[in-house]
Image: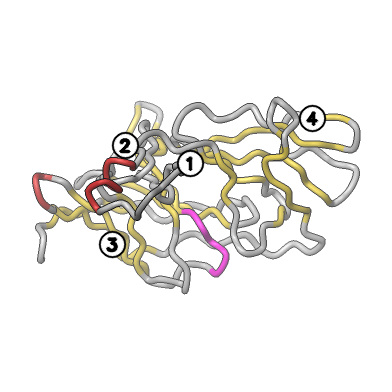
Amino acid sequence: MTRAATLAMVLAVVPAAPSAVEAKRMCFQGPLPPQVISGARAKIAGSGGVIVASGAELPDWRFRDLNRVVRPRVVTLAPGLAIYHPPPLAGTDVVVEDTGHGEVARTERALSIEPAPGAPDVARITSTEQTAGRRIVDAQLTTPTPEHAIIVVVSKVVSTLDGTRVVPLTWANVPGSNPSSVRLWYPPGGCDSVIERSVEPRAGDRVVLTWVDDAGRVSEPSKPLVIAGGSKGK
């Protein structure tokens, strides 16, 4: 389940710094507010687009093209995660607007196109029991995360009469520094904002992982792996 940064409420008059208990009461825990996710480059390249996350419905955002507003082609990747693909625009500037014509985000098209990330090379995925039956899910990678990958999507492989299909369960932000381990799920708590439609990947599920890079492009899926179960400390 994706977690946003902690949301802090701002008070008009604060006579003194709140205690830890007071700060806890001030926290807001609820659906992730609609937002654009971008990385260091923050440019659209090739088949990419603007990455949008929302804990509620995906917002009806548009692209500004000179003196007109055009709708995106929205491709949903997982609960609360989508790529807003712009149509051909007059220039290199890419401006996202809300329904009231307020600017939500601004980026540009990349003039050079680098290859999209390769498929994740995953050694194993483990669901580890924590306290009170809550579990965390981690992926150990054979090769480090690609340099510009900022999101990982977890999808379950489901058998059907016609073969198999892939059902997105959840997604997570990828830490920097080319990690060899990525946390796919942890139980919500504290001041986290949540994607309520996310589904916990469970031990025994057969899943694939895909990268999303900061240019809004999606990799090929990893090879399917069955999530192994484990206990805390093992």
The mark closer to the camera, 2 or 1, is: 1
13 on left or right of 212: left
Of the pair 26 and 176, the residue shown nearer to us: 26
Q: Residue at x 71, y 56 (%)?
A: 43
Q: Position of residue 180 (x, y in %)?
A: 37, 71
Residue at numbered disc 4: 70
In the rendered image, which residue does mark 1 sit on? 12
Distance from disc 4 to disc 3, alpha carbons, whole Å, reads 43 Å
Q: Position of residue 58 (x, y in %)?
A: 55, 30
* Element at label 4: strand
* Dot placed on the residue nearer the N-terminal end, 2 or 3: 3
Q: Amino acid at mark 1?
A: Ala
Q: Earlier in the sequence, mark 1 or mark 4?
A: 1
Instruction: Tell me residue 51's x, y (percent).
Output: 59, 45
Question: Residue type at mark 3?
Answer: Arg
Q: Nearer the viewer, residue 158 or 188?
A: 188
> Callout 3: 10 Å neighbours few (<14), some, many (20+)?
some
Using the numbered discs, state the Cα–Cα distance from disc 2 to disc 4 in whole angstroms. 33 Å
Instruction: Indicate yes or no whether the magenta region holds residue 226.
Output: no
Looking at the image, is 155 positioned above or below residue 67? below
Which circle marks residue 199 in the picture? 2
